[in-house]
Image (cartoon, rainbow, N blue to C red):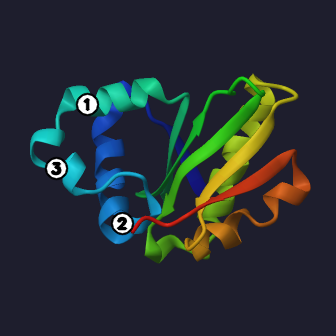
Amino acid sequence: MVDVVVVTAGNWRLWRELRRAALLEAPGAFGSTLAEWCGEGDTEARWRALLGDVALNLVLVLDSVPVGMVSALAPSADDTVELISLWIAPAARGRGVGDEAVRQVVAWASDKYPGSSLLLSVKSDNNSVCRCTSGTASSTRARHRKIRPSG
């Protein structure tokens, strides 16, 4: 069973741990780099601000171990909620964690912003996330936006 933890500024250390693991394991999947979040960039104030600026931040826990993360932005002017920053640890892939992450965002968006659509922003070379979210667009008011890989 996958447990879900809502992450706020108060438990920023949990988000920091997973985000840094994600940036290390899949550096091309995100718009920022591990180097940007280390050293001088690794401050409590910065992590808290990041979490405060994003409407939904979730950590997914499998067998009592944090193994995934996902975020969602509040609706834009065109009433679209955007799913961002989805990452699942390699050892947890294929075990339903990514599916649960997407389900959680869809449920949150449907509950908090009824009638909104969902945009799944995925780097086009991020095959594991593309597979994980492929059924979402057909089962909800969702659409994919593939973003060119960095570099």
Residue carrying label 2:
27
Amino acid carrying label 1: it is Arg
Is residue 147 placed above or below 85 in the rendered structure? Answer: below
Q: Is residue 1 visible?
A: no
The amino acid type of the residue labelled 3 equals Cys
Q: Is residue 88 left or right of residue 47?
A: right
Does label 1 or label 3 sit earlier along the sequence?
A: 3
**Residue at screen point 80% across, 57% down:** 136
| Residue 28, placed above or below residue 105 | below
Q: Earlier in the sequence, mark 2 or mark 1?
A: 2
**Where in the figure is residue 80, as x and y percent of width and height?**
74, 34
Residue 105 place in picture, x, y as percent: 67, 42
* Above or below: residue 38 compared with residue 99: above
Using the numbered discs, state the Cα–Cα distance from disc 1 to disc 3 in whole angstroms.
Answer: 11 Å
Please state, as top left, top right, bottom left or bottom right, where the C terminus lies in the image: bottom left
Q: Find disc 1 in the rendering and name its residue.
A: 46
User: Residue 129 location, x and y as percent?
Assistant: 61, 67
Element type at mark 2? helix
| Type of the residue with mark 2 | Pro
**In what element is the residue under mark 3?**
loop
Residue at the image point whose x is 55% and y is 28% from the top:
55
Answer with left or right where residue 118 lies relative to residue 50: right
